[in-house]
Protein backbone atom coordinates (compact mmCIF):
# COMPACT_ATOMS: atom_id res chain seq x y z
CA UNK A 1 0.00 0.00 0.00
CA UNK A 2 1.44 3.36 -1.04
CA UNK A 3 1.93 5.97 1.70
CA UNK A 4 1.03 9.59 1.07
CA UNK A 5 1.96 12.55 3.25
CA UNK A 6 -0.86 15.11 2.98
CA UNK A 7 0.10 18.58 4.21
CA UNK A 8 -2.87 20.94 4.49
CA UNK A 9 -4.29 23.05 7.31
CA UNK A 10 -7.73 23.35 5.67
CA UNK A 11 -9.61 20.77 7.77
CA UNK A 12 -12.61 20.34 5.49
CA UNK A 13 -10.60 19.92 2.28
CA UNK A 14 -8.04 17.70 4.01
CA UNK A 15 -10.76 15.38 5.35
CA UNK A 16 -12.36 15.11 1.91
CA UNK A 17 -9.03 14.30 0.25
CA UNK A 18 -8.08 11.87 2.99
CA UNK A 19 -11.36 9.96 2.67
CA UNK A 20 -11.09 9.73 -1.12
CA UNK A 21 -7.45 8.64 -1.11
CA UNK A 22 -8.00 6.09 1.69
CA UNK A 23 -10.97 4.65 -0.18
CA UNK A 24 -8.69 4.29 -3.23
CA UNK A 25 -6.32 2.18 -1.14
CA UNK A 26 -3.67 4.65 -0.01
CA UNK A 27 -2.29 4.96 3.50
CA UNK A 28 -2.57 8.65 4.41
CA UNK A 29 -0.46 10.49 6.98
CA UNK A 30 -1.61 14.02 7.71
CA UNK A 31 0.30 17.04 8.88
CA UNK A 32 -1.13 20.52 9.19
CA UNK A 33 2.21 22.28 8.83
CA UNK A 34 5.19 22.00 6.54
CA UNK A 35 7.63 22.12 9.46
CA UNK A 36 6.05 19.04 11.09
CA UNK A 37 6.02 17.28 7.73
CA UNK A 38 9.73 18.03 7.27
CA UNK A 39 10.45 16.50 10.67
CA UNK A 40 8.70 13.33 9.54
CA UNK A 41 10.67 13.18 6.30
CA UNK A 42 14.01 13.95 7.88
CA UNK A 43 13.40 11.36 10.60
CA UNK A 44 13.29 8.82 7.77
CA UNK A 45 9.58 8.10 7.64
CA UNK A 46 9.00 6.59 4.21
CA UNK A 47 6.46 8.05 1.81
CA UNK A 48 5.68 7.40 -1.83
CA UNK A 49 4.19 10.84 -2.47
CA UNK A 50 3.80 14.24 -0.80
CA UNK A 51 0.73 16.39 -1.46
CA UNK A 52 0.83 19.94 -0.11
CA UNK A 53 -1.58 22.87 -0.23
CA UNK A 54 0.53 25.62 -1.70
CA UNK A 55 -1.81 28.47 -0.78
CA UNK A 56 -1.46 28.33 2.98
CA UNK A 57 1.84 29.92 4.02
CA UNK A 58 2.96 29.89 0.38
CA UNK A 59 6.55 31.05 0.88
CA UNK A 60 7.05 28.61 3.75
CA UNK A 61 5.67 25.82 1.57
CA UNK A 62 8.04 26.74 -1.28
CA UNK A 63 10.85 26.42 1.27
CA UNK A 64 9.42 23.05 2.35
CA UNK A 65 9.65 21.76 -1.24
CA UNK A 66 13.13 23.21 -1.69
CA UNK A 67 14.31 21.63 1.60
CA UNK A 68 13.01 18.23 0.52
CA UNK A 69 14.76 18.50 -2.83
CA UNK A 70 18.06 19.59 -1.26
CA UNK A 71 17.92 16.73 1.22
CA UNK A 72 16.95 14.20 -1.41
CA UNK A 73 19.84 15.24 -3.65
CA UNK A 74 22.14 14.13 -0.85
CA UNK A 75 21.46 10.48 -1.57
CA UNK A 76 17.89 9.65 -0.63
CA UNK A 77 15.40 8.42 -3.21
CA UNK A 78 13.37 10.84 -5.26
CA UNK A 79 10.03 11.67 -3.70
CA UNK A 80 7.28 13.04 -5.96
CA UNK A 81 5.57 16.23 -4.78
CA UNK A 82 2.15 17.44 -5.92
CA UNK A 83 1.02 20.92 -4.94
CA UNK A 84 -2.57 22.10 -4.77
CA UNK A 85 -3.56 25.72 -5.35
CA UNK A 86 -6.80 27.69 -5.42
CA UNK A 87 -5.26 30.18 -7.84
CA UNK A 88 -4.74 29.51 -11.52
CA UNK A 89 -1.52 31.50 -11.75
CA UNK A 90 1.25 30.71 -14.21
CA UNK A 91 3.69 32.64 -12.03
CA UNK A 92 2.90 30.58 -8.93
CA UNK A 93 3.03 27.31 -10.84
CA UNK A 94 6.31 28.26 -12.53
CA UNK A 95 7.86 29.10 -9.16
CA UNK A 96 6.66 25.77 -7.77
CA UNK A 97 8.28 23.89 -10.65
CA UNK A 98 11.54 25.79 -10.13
CA UNK A 99 11.51 24.65 -6.49
CA UNK A 100 11.14 21.00 -7.51
CA UNK A 101 7.41 20.30 -7.61
CA UNK A 102 6.47 17.47 -9.97
CA UNK A 103 2.90 18.59 -10.61
CA UNK A 104 0.55 21.45 -9.72
CA UNK A 105 -3.17 20.80 -9.54
CA UNK A 106 -5.77 23.52 -9.41
CA UNK A 107 -7.73 22.83 -6.26
CA UNK A 108 -11.52 22.89 -6.30
CA UNK A 109 -14.11 22.65 -3.53
CA UNK A 110 -13.97 18.88 -3.53
CA UNK A 111 -10.92 16.70 -3.70
CA UNK A 112 -10.38 16.53 -7.41
CA UNK A 113 -10.42 13.33 -9.42
CA UNK A 114 -7.30 14.78 -11.08
CA UNK A 115 -5.56 14.45 -7.73
CA UNK A 116 -6.63 10.82 -7.36
CA UNK A 117 -5.52 9.97 -10.90
CA UNK A 118 -2.13 11.63 -10.44
CA UNK A 119 -1.60 10.03 -7.02
CA UNK A 120 -2.11 6.65 -8.69
CA UNK A 121 0.37 7.53 -11.43
CA UNK A 122 3.07 8.91 -9.11
CA UNK A 123 2.84 5.93 -6.74
CA UNK A 124 2.93 3.40 -9.57
CA UNK A 125 -0.62 2.08 -9.20
CA UNK A 126 -1.26 2.91 -12.86
CA UNK A 127 0.99 3.82 -15.77
CA UNK A 128 1.04 7.33 -17.02
CA UNK A 129 -0.43 7.66 -20.49
CA UNK A 130 2.70 9.67 -21.32
CA UNK A 131 5.18 6.85 -20.58
CA UNK A 132 6.61 5.36 -23.73
CA UNK A 133 8.54 2.12 -23.48
Image (cartoon, grey):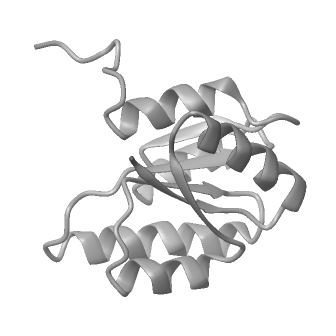
Q: Can residue 70 be seen at all in this image of the molecule?
A: yes
- Seen from the viewer's position, the closer of residues 121 and 70 is 121
Could you tell whether 1 is left or right of 75 in the image?
right
Question: Percent from the top left, x then y, of residue 91?
Answer: 63, 45
Q: Quarter of the image holding residue 44?
A: bottom left
User: At 70% from the left edge and 66% from the top edge, which residue is drawn?
Assistant: 58
User: At 61% from the left edge and 69% from the top edge, which residue is drawn?
Assistant: 61
Q: Can residue 85 be seen at all in this image of the molecule?
A: no
- Seen from the viewer's position, the closer of residues 108 and 40 is 40
Could you tell whether 34 is left or right of 123 in the image?
right
**Height in image: 51 above or below 5?**
above
User: At 66% from the left edge and 46% from the top edge, which residue is drawn?
Assistant: 84
- Seen from the viewer's position, the closer of residues 25 and 113 is 25
Question: Percent from the top left, x then y, of residue 113?
Answer: 66, 24
Q: Quarter of the image holding residue 32?
A: bottom right
**Height in image: 74 above or below 21?**
below
Viewport quadrant of the C terminus: top left
- Seen from the viewer's position, the closer of residues 120 and 85 is 120
**Height in image: 11 above or below 81?**
below
**Height in image: 28 above or below 127?**
below
Question: Percent from the top left, x then y, of residue 64?
Answer: 52, 73
Q: Quarter of the image holding residue 112?
A: top right
Amino acid sequence: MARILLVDSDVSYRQTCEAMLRYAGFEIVIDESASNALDRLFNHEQFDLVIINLDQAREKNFKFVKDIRLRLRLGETKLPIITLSDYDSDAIFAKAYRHGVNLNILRDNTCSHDLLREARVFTGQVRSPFNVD
